[in-house]
Every structure is written in structure tokens, then in C-alpha cells.
Image (cartoon, rainbow, N blue to C red):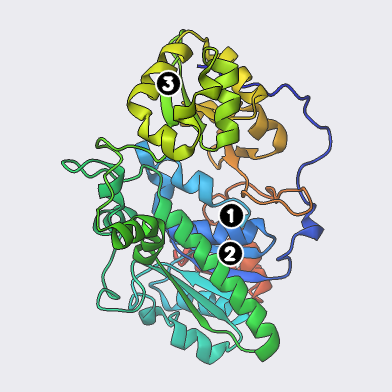
Amino acid sequence: MPCNTTSASPSTASPYLTPDALPLQGVRVLEISHMIMGPATGMTLADLGAEVIKVEPVDGDRTRRLQSAGIGYFPVFNRNKQSLAVDLKSAEGQKLVQDLADRADIVLENFRDDSLQQYGLDYEAVRARNPRAIYVSLKGFLSGPYKERTALDEVAQMMGGMAYINGSEERPQRAAPSVNDILGGQFGVIGALSALHERARTGVGQYVRAGLFETNLLLVAQFITQFELTGTPALPFGSKREPPWGVYDLFHTKDGGRVFVAVVSDVQWRSFATEFMPAGWAEDARLFSAVDREAARPWVVPAVAEVLKTWNTAELCAALERAKLSYAPVNQPHDLLKDPHLTQGGALMPTVLPTGEHISTPALPLEFNGLKVGKRSDPPKVGEHTAAILKELGLDDEAIALLRQHGKIGG
């Protein structure tokens, strides 16, 4: 149900930094990764201006071929990158990628700890040849008894309490977005940038590691602390739970919509009661404080629901906006494609896939002096930049053609 009060005209000025103003221009990144956590890390560095070479198998990263719920993995997390398609199982392919690692500022990977060792691309091997390299590993677990385990976002959510707190006691439910993968990747970026800063002082790189399970720990920390301080486990969101404020609920509207309304301060309560409730509610002594209103929820929330269900969705949103109250319509993800704040602000960027399909992908949720970092190039075709990358390594057309002929490279 539409619920948007923004009517400003779109600006004609670009909302993005120009390429020469990007903060990481000149930084070279070698990305050996797949799925989400590694590509999300590489995309963030690429968006910020780094030159990111994505190493793929000759037939391409397998996320290119995913369908259904996985169909968005490659399109969302691989813009602004160059694609090198190479057979890492061959000696020739290994040598090419090793040469690129020797020139890289950052090498990032998200494979098992021992899997890149056989290719001479593990941390110790890269450091021996390129001591300035910052090696970023994106793993299931950091140091500890679980370090060697493999993990996925859902594994981390299940064992980390997120699925429990997000579902019900009877049915744990993972958070639908790949929250640990994406946020864990951003911690990989934070580690890489911190190590770059340190390298400017020392001249040497270091080993950075980010973990899914530990990312999950940070995300559920408030519930752990709640238990430590109260002795009472937090109730799952799918169970009957009472919010800590008098009005902090989802309400139905007259035209079939639903709007979440949050009234958390005393000033907000007086504004809400004056604008929406019958006369006298704003002065009711039983509702003066947040503690009072929380205790009164059993009769306050039904009364508020009776009033708000007489409003149309759009009119209610407009009135809440005028009253400067927090509210949100219930949207489906694809509804955001038409959100004027996102489209006019540059948060959604037109993107062309290697298949020729047109989609919209989100810019990083960052601004530098009011400007976002945008898209310099669309997600690449498999091996789209292989020849150009190898020429920079000193290979001529004949050598590249021979490697292609023998299946050592693609593109």
C-alpha cells in the first residue's frame, strides 16, 4: 500500500563522487572469493575506488548460475570489478594469479584455510613474496576451537542465537537477508583499511581475518547483556513479547494497509495524543511518563488501534510526518524500487548484467561531503578483462592465445 509523503523534485546534479575523487583510487585488490561474504568485501573496496581483480574459474563464479533465491548474489555484489577467468588447478594459472598477488596491496579470500595453500596463494606464501600485501581472510570462525569449521550465514545464525530470537521458541527462523555475510564482509573492509593505514607507518602488511560467527555475536550482544543484567532470557520476536514503550506497534488502516508507529518519548506522546487521540489523552496523568505508558499498554494499544483503523494509509503517513513521529509502512523489498527517497537520492543505481538484463542495485550507504560512491562499471562477463590483465603482466597476444587454446584461461 503506498505510503510516501516525499514530493521533492529530483536534482539534476549527480549524487556520486567522480572517479578521481574516490578515496581508494590507486589501491590494487586481488579477490579470490565466491558466494557473498568475499564478493561483498571486494565490492565495497571497488566502490570506494580500488582496482579489484576478481579471480574466477574458467567457466565463471558458480553464483552466476544460481536461480531462485540465489539469483541476486552475483548481480548485487560484483560491480566495479575486473574479471580474470583462470584455471587455478593448472601450474600456468597458479603462476598468473601469484604474479598478481605479488603486485597487490590487498589479497582477499573466503575459502577453507588449507585450500589456497596448494596453489601458493595462502597468507604465508603471499607474504614471503610480497611483504607489503594485506591478506584478508573471510571465514566462518575466528581463532578458537571452531576455527577450522566451515560455516554459512544460516549456520552462524542458528548456533549464534539469531535464528532463535528472530523466530519463536518452537520454530527458530533465520533472518532472511544474509546479514552475517554482508556485515562480516564490512568488517573485512574495516580490517583492510586499518591495515593499509598501519602499513603507511611500518611499510609491511599483515593478516586480517573476519568471521561469520563473531559477527553474529555482535548482532545478538544486546540480548546476551539483557540476560546477564536481568537473569531473564529475551523472548523470541515471534513469541508474545511486550515492547518497552507504550505505543510501539503495527496498526491496520482503513484501506487494508499496515503502518508501524513508534512513540517513545514524552514529547512524542503529547504530539501523538494531541494529533490523533480524543480530547484529554495528552493530559491524562496515567500516561505522563514512558513507564506509565508501558504499564498501560493493555488498554492504550487497543484504543490507539481503534482510532488509527479509521485512517487511510497515505493520510495517516502524511499526518505522522507532519507530527514528526517515527512511522513506517510495511513494504515488500521490491516496493523500494519506487521509493522517491532512494531513486532521487541516488541510492539505487541502474545496472546492466552480462546477460543484457537491466536491474537496480543499491549504492553503499555512505556519503562523502553529501555525495555517494557510485558505479563505474557493471558486473563483468566471465573473463571479460582476462586479456587486458595478462598484458599488464607482460604476456603478448600469442602467449594469451596459447593459454586460452589449452583451457588455462577464459574470456
Q: Amino acid at mark 1?
A: Glu
Mark number displayed over residue 384? 1
- Whether 277 is drawn above or below 270: the answer is above
Disc 3: which residue? 251
Residue 70 visible in this rendered orientation of the protein: yes
Q: Residue at x 34, y 79 (%)?
A: 143
The tag earlier along the polypeptide, 1 or 3, is 3
Marks 1/2: CA distance?
Answer: 11 Å
Please tell me whether mark 3 or mark 2 is closer to you in this view. Answer: 3
Q: Amino acid at mark 2?
A: Ile
- Whether 151 is drawn above or below 248: the answer is below
Query: In the picture, residue 153 is in which quadrant?
Result: bottom left
Direction from residue 42 to residue 323 in the image, left or right: right
The tag earlier along the polypeptide, 3 or 2, is 2
On the image, the x and y values in percent for residue 222 come to: 39, 56
Marks 1/3: CA distance?
Answer: 51 Å
Q: Residues within 10 Å of mark 3 (few under 14, many from 20)?
A: some
Image quadrant for the C terminus?
A: bottom right
Query: In the picture, residue 89 is in which quadrant?
Result: bottom left
On the image, the x and y values in percent for residue 135 come to: 51, 78
Residue 356 visible in this rendered orientation of the protein: no
Direction from residue 347 to residue 253 in the image, left or right: left
Question: Which secondary structure lies at badge 3?
Answer: strand
- Whether 78 is drawn above or below 298: the answer is below
Disc 2: which residue? 53
The one nearer the camera, 362 or 126, is 362
Marks 3/2: CA distance?
Answer: 49 Å
